[in-house]
Amino acid sequence: MIKEQRYEFKKDLLQIHKKDRRDFSLKPEENEFTVPEGLCIVLPEKYDSVVETAAWDFADYMLKSMDQAAMVTKKASSEACLKLSYNKDLGDASGYMGYRITVTDSGITLEGYDSVGIAQGLYFLEDLMNLRRAPFLEKKITQKKALFSPRFAQSPFGMFEYNDECLSYMAHLGYDAIMLWIDGLNINHRGEYIDMYLLCERAERYGINVYIQLYRDHSAHPDDPGAEEFYDNLYGKIFKACPKIKGVELVGEANHFHSKDPDSRIGKAPLSANFEDNIPTGKVTPGFWPCRDYPQWISLIKKCISKYRPDVDIVFCTYNWSWAPEEERLRLIENLPTDITLLSAWDVCQQFDIGKAKGDTTDYSLRQTEASDYFASEARAAKKRGIKVYANTETAGLTWDFGVIPYEPMPYQWLKRFESIVKSHQEWGVCGLLECIHYGFYPSFISDLEKWAFFTHEENLTDVLHRILKRDFGENSFDKVNEAMLKWSEAISHATASNEDQYGAFRVGPSYPLWVADPRTDIFGGYPESGRIPTENNAMFGNMIYNPAYTPDMGFNRNNSMPGLRLYEEMKEIEIMRDLLSEGINLLESVPNPNEKLLRVLNIGKFMYRSCITGINVKKLFVMSQELNIASDAQKMLDIIDNMEKLLLEEKKNVEETIPVVQADSRLGWEPSMEYQGDEKCLRWKLRQLDYDLNYTLKKHRESCKL
């Protein structure tokens, strides 16, 4: 592969319809209809911008991907055409995003329950021809509708970068909502101007709704004089200016509600207010506890917004107190208004055995496919009361197991998760999904598979996956690619999912520093930015979303084993993950004449493998540091320092071998809210950091042992 420059991956994202997908050696089967050159796409008598946008998109697809022309028209000029129409009676496909496609000898008819149904039908025709690698469609009737709405996603181009290509990708994949993080009207959470009114108008053309999450101090309590005026000014003016905003997500850590709940466990807002003379009060800030006056607060906000948007969707997120006792959480749900939506996180706070220790899913991990006990308890309680439930599932292709890769290529593990989520729809009525947060989505074969799973379907999803793998990586490569995907899917089931790792080495991969002395407490006064990788000026979180040195998490609220008990078991798990990733890499490397897509997924595997090595080395260095701090024998200290040197040299080799991996793919090492924290530049920073410790810190340590 050619060495890519920073951000070069965005150039490829600009091409929605990939060129030259058609294999001209293929011939139609007897039961297939051949889409003719010059196909007429006939619009319904009355149509809106969603249908028109999708129709022109389909014409563009036919030209670029299938190498033949198509035209959009209001009247058919030939029998062999694609006729679009509305129909509210589609049987099992009647409902939001519902459509029926009928393919016969004389042409194609596409009936949509609504405009987004027509659009999704057109996108599905693209999917079918991509799988077939030719403009051939089986003569049959196909009916589908969406199982979930909204399906929230954030941009693959960067934080708040909602260009038309982003919106088009979202629509093609079935995502129909954006969660926009703002600090106020037309000000995004990065402090920049964003035209919210225009974004709503542009998104509407693709059938996408805009929601907001407001990062402001919600200091007025509903009982306070002037509270309604306060929230009308906070939210009302936003909806007055942008009435097409569909809804609001209320999140404890973003809103800092000033509760008056008399519970003695509850402190002040924000979190930093719960200290006296720099000593914690031991109380919980309201944003992290299911306070009894949340229902009153929610109702007031809804009242203020409803003046401008009567059907506003108020989404109340319980993530921040997922760790709280079940009886406290369910008591809150019992008192919530029923005309709002509850959003709970699919997998967090689920405890599991990790060898002889106990750990849990701190934040979003593909290790876990089933709903957590926390999520299940809240979904059941909400269903009982008739409250809508959305799930924070992180199903757009990436969780927090690896922070700076585009997606996790573990399809069989994803399939298990998809199937569990569909089951929650059937059993608990889960109807909407938050599929990614600040790290966005990235179009991949995982997001393609997800789309099949989250629409009604008769197809066996494993068979669909096999067809997708053959489409992307080639028929002749399928056996080895499929075996590699099985290995990698097993590998992710050994992800540790701990705070130490998700906010440590696995956040940024092999560029994560290995400091011998903790940069936050070093006797020389500390390093700039506490020993973190320098960050880009335009980053939202930048280097502040990970700890620069291994930080034990006591996990008191979650009843996990102490870090010392978990650490060694976690190393064993990461070693298993590393070895399974390696087996998959070896399989992919044995494929003769790999295409570019295979080389790119192979590179993702190599990056994950190298991240595992760093993750293990970080833990080993932490253990050595603790041993060095308490050793009482100078020779033992020198032996530990020698082992530290060996470890740093091993890590240096690991970093050096990661450089060609990221050179070949500019998306590796990048994440929308952090920008670059793991590319070649960052890896070379890591090499200089290792040299500092090898040539300076260890030398000083040895001298100190001889005093």
Image (spheres, grey):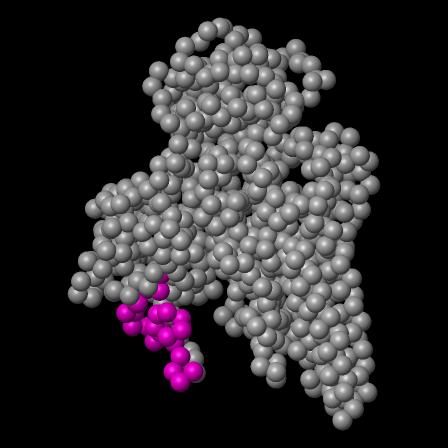
Name the residue at 51% across, 21% down. Answer: 59
Please state the horizontal and vertical placement of residue 190, each as a whole percent of the image: 43, 56
* Location of residue 703 with respect to 430 vertically, above or below: below
Q: Classify residue 231 by image quadrant.
A: bottom left
Choose top left, top right, bottom left or bottom right for residue 22: top right
Magenta stretch bounds: 255-278
Please provide percent x and percent y for residue 28: 66, 14
The answer to whether residue 625 is left or right of residue 41 is: right
Residue 61 left/right relative to 506:
left
| x then y, percent, for residue 442 | 56, 43
Q: Name the dominant secondary structure of the magenta segment.
A: loop
Closer to the camera in the image, 103 or 377: 103
What's the residue at 38%, 20% (across, down)?
Answer: 86
Q: Residue furthest top?
A: 78
| 331 inside magenta stretch | no
Q: Can you see residue 420?
A: no
